[in-house]
Image (tube, coloured by chain):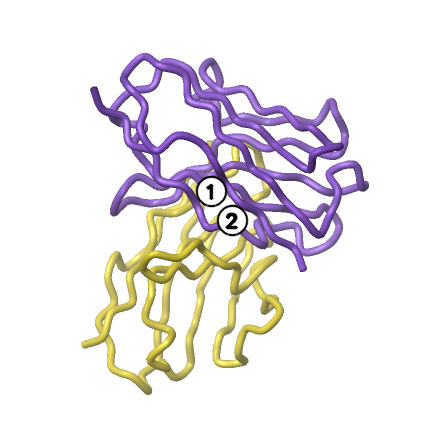
Amino acid sequence: QITLKESGPTLVKPTQTLTLTCTFSGFSLSTYGVRVGWIRQPPGKALEWLAIISWDDDDTHYSPSLRTRLTITKDTSKNQVVLTMTNMDPEDTATYYCARRVVAAIDWFDPWGQGTLVTVSS
Amino acid sequence: EIVLTQSPATLSLSPGERATLSCRASQSVSTYLGWYQQKPGQAPRVVIYDAVNRATGIPARFSGSGSGTDFTLTISSLEPEDFAVYYCQQRSNWPLTFGGGTKVEIK
């Protein structure tokens, strides 16, 4: 069974750095074709893709609009992917999801974690 | 960046009716278009991938069509569990982008 679960702070202050961890099971990020991405959703709004990291250490992509604030890393031994977002703003309040993609299979976000709501407020 | 425009924003229908959702891309995405269903309080799940393929466990009443810039998700006969928000997403080009969503609500 493939599962992903997001963890991190539920409340951060403006200008702080957010660190979120995606812990997964049922697959390995060292397997060819596997990717894990982050997507967020402000309350009542649409989905927004943030970043993705791949089995290939050189294959990492970011949303251009957030590129300067995001870093995505992986710890293959712990089955974790970490997303850091600097200089948090109230507009970054959202539910943050991680999800798996597998190149050359059903190369879409499937499955997703349950999501974690992050509120940015002083 | 490829912009995906979904229409309508809201679709009010009764169970048993046919739902037709549209997703238009600002440039061709070939068939690299997927549809996700999201119910309140839940994470999205993929229902259609590569424009026309049903994901595992998705009932046959869901179908996808289109290529290039114009895509359609059709639910042939709405069941109560189908009322949800549906998002399209493209994976043709980086950055990955999602549409704004179509809410299918009970009339």
What is the quadrant of the C terminus of chain A in the image?
top left
Do the residues under discs 2 and 1 have CB atoms within 8 angstroms? yes
State the yellow chain. Answer: B
In this view, B1 is above or below A98? above
Label 2 crowd (10 A; few <14 / some 14-19 / many >=20): many
On the image, numbered disc 1 is attached to which residue? Answer: A97
In this view, A109 is above or below B97? below
**Left or right of residue A111: residue A74:** right
Q: Chain of mark 2?
A: A
**SS at mark 1?**
strand
Q: Label 2 is placed on what type of residue?
A: Gly
- What is the CA distance from the residue labelled 2 to the residue labelled 1? 6 Å
Label 1 crowd (10 A; few <14 / some 14-19 / many >=20): many
Quadrant housing residue B17: bottom left
Q: Nearer the viewer, residue A42 or B75?
A: A42
User: What x and y, as percent, mark residue A6?
Assistant: 50, 40
Q: Nearer the viewer, residue A5 or B20?
A: A5
Q: Which label sits on residue A113?
A: 2
Q: Colour of chain A?
A: purple
